[in-house]
Image: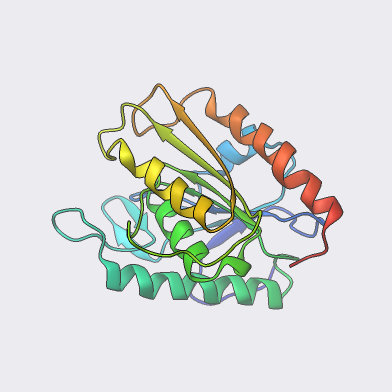
Amino acid sequence: MPDLKGFHYRATSTADAGPPLLLLHGSSRDETELPPLAETAAPGWPYLSLRGPIPWESGYAFFRRNPDRTLDQSDLALQTGRLRTFLQAAIETGLIARPPILFGFSNGAIIAASLMIRDPDIAAGAILVRPLSLDPDAIIPSMPAKPVLILSGDRDDRRSPEDATRIASQFQAAGADVTSHSSPTDHHLHDDEPAIIGQWLASRVFPLAHTRPPL
């Protein structure tokens, strides 16, 4: 396994022809949080699970927040660039064979969206669980038919009801193939969501992996 200095990750075999999942955990967590979800939602699907670089409470995060919990936009931009560098190195070293599906939860979903907005070609698509819009007025670059799944909770006290709708609309305006689903839950995962993720991967991503060359 390549030694990408400064990055902590765990991986299954990612040499499969299809795009692997890049797992991006929530704040105060680490690279062990999302593999069980990925293995439940899509058994056998290759993944690479990355640890956020920012020590945060009892774990890590992918970017900092301000004291009032608003996004630290300058740090988000910095860490998004760092994540992009990691992905480029992962492909160049053969750690992954092609651009991945970004699979982020909460803090990880926000940086996944940030990366998609700044460089749509770096990823084959995205699964955004409990995201929010980085900038409601931002114009997102064109990403025709790029598959994006957005999962929200209708009782999520960390998100406003408009957050998922707003970011979905932004990706749709950029031409992405957006699927949105709201579950009767709070910020935590709902029992039905692993199946929703698995069905989306099977219908939106699996066919692409077998009909399109690597990006």
Give 95 or 167, whichever is nearer the viewer: 167
Q: Is residue 189 left or right of residue 54?
A: right
**Measured along the vertical axis of the image, is residue 49 above or below residue 92?**
above
Residue that lies at the very extreme toward the left in this rendered image: 68
- Residue 3 seen in the figure: no
- Quarter of the figure that contains the N terminus: bottom right
169 left or right of 160?
Answer: right
From the top left corner, tell me how far across and down residue 181 is, in percent: 50, 32
Q: Is residue 212 above or below residue 164?
A: below
Q: Tell me where residue 113 appears, x and y as whole percent.
A: 46, 57
Residue 171 image point, x, y percent: 50, 53
Residue at the image position 35 percent from the left and 27 percent from the top: 154
Residue at the image position 27 percent from the left and 39 percent from the top: 160
Q: Pinpoint residue 81: horizontal percent, then vertical percent.
A: 45, 75
Q: Is residue 213 visible?
A: yes
What residue appears at the point 50 percent right and 54 percent down from the top-left corner? 173
Relative to 130, residue 188 above or below: above
Quarter of the picture holding the C terminus:
bottom right
Q: Quadrant of residue 214?
A: bottom right
